[in-house]
Amino acid sequence: MTLAVFGHGQQSPAQPVPSDPFQQAWERTKDADPMVRMRAAETLGDMRRPDAGPALAPLFEDPHPFVRSAAVNAAGRMRLPGIAPRLAALLDPAKEGEGHVRQAAATMLAFVGDASSVEAIVLALKDSERGVRYAAARSLGSLRAGKAVRPLAVLLKSPDADMRRTAAGSLGQIMGKESLEALQAALLDEKETAVREEIIRSMGFLSDATAAPTLTVALKDPVPAVRLQAAMALGRLGDSSGQSVACDLLKDASPELRITAANALSLIGDEGQGLPALDSAVKAETDADVKGRLEQARMVLRAKLGIPESPPADALPEGGGDARPPASTAPPPAPEAGAKKPAVAAPAVKEPKKAAPADEGKKPKKTAPPARKAVAPEKKSSGKKEGRPKK
């Protein structure tokens, strides 16, 4: 009240007119603070407006590398028209000296999806920065660039195991006979488990039936995880010969392997072997998290095979009550009104109207007992004979 009284008659302060967030971010790209410019570039990228190109273009030349990186990421995510040549130019160390900016450019070229940038990305496979090489290898796989098969095959012999694995994954995305040949040759000499897994997985994705003999040999690999990958790769080729491998590994001590085996069976299992193995594994599993994953795989396989879920063990059959507990087969209890009857009343009598009351020798009162009320209709009780006792 005090504020209302003293404020009466005074003008309220003018409220600032809210500015357009897009225009506000545009203006902040010119701010003297590089952190403000970086956040402005990120904001423009989040807005995904194609007319933000003129605001982001000057930031490609910003003196601060983190501002340039933010501008590259924003432009790539927005897939601005004509941005691919600008990003490809940044892969040249002579034009962009910061490795993380070149890495951002190599990554965003995969988002843009312009095949004209393949040659520049292939050159980036030899970049001095490890992160740039990884980004370039992944982007070539995403672009499914056939020209990149041979350079990626060379990386399968890299001393860096992670680079070999990345190259194998990219080759699995580039369909073609040349990719399969490179992967098969690399598998023969590969010692690292993770790399062998990736090579076999990629061979399955290539969907080339000529890979089946190599994958069949891999079913006997000493490492269980590699055997599972071989079983799944064969399954993608329509070959379920690795099903027994997955069934055996459902009992492995490793929770991760049990889950992977279940996932493999959801892909390659059949009604005769895979589904019964999953049913048994679900019942035997004691780890709640693993049990849920196994159950999910079992449901996927059932749906794939067109087999409906079985009813729970304690559910009643559709046809009747044979499966009810024994207590439910006993005669139904006497109705509540029977509480006034003597204990000798037969339980089979459905209507207790003929049962004699406890005081049988006495004359009935005006209020009729339940048995008589059930038999005699109300019309007879109102007849002339009821009036005779008044004489």
Image (cartoon, rainbow, N blue to C red):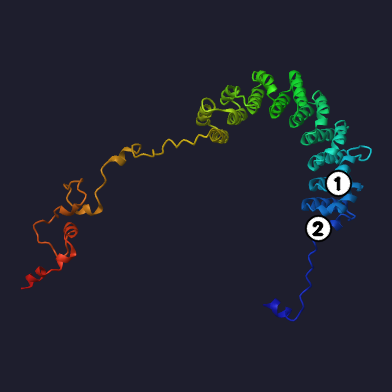
Q: Is residue 229 above or below residue 19?
A: above
Q: Residue at x 88, y 44 (%)?
A: 65
The reply to whether dot 1 and dot 2 touch (C-beta < 8 Å) is: no
Residue 128 vs 15, above or below: the answer is above
Residue 93 at x, y = what percent? Answer: 92, 37
Q: Is residue 61 above or below residue 309?
A: below
Q: Amino acid at mark 1?
A: Gly
Q: Is residue 288 visible?
A: no
Q: Name the residue beneath numbered marker 2.
A: 22
Towards the viewer: 101 or 136 = 136
Q: Residues within 10 Å of mark 2 (few under 14, many from 20)?
A: some
Q: Position of residue 128 (x, y in %)?
A: 88, 32
Identify the residue at horizontal 57%, vertical 22% (top origin): 244
Q: Earlier in the sequence, mark 1 or mark 2?
A: 2
Q: Which residue is mark 1?
A: 82
Looking at the rendering, in which quadrant would you find the C terminus? bottom left
Q: Could you tell me residue 194's position as x and y percent?
A: 72, 26
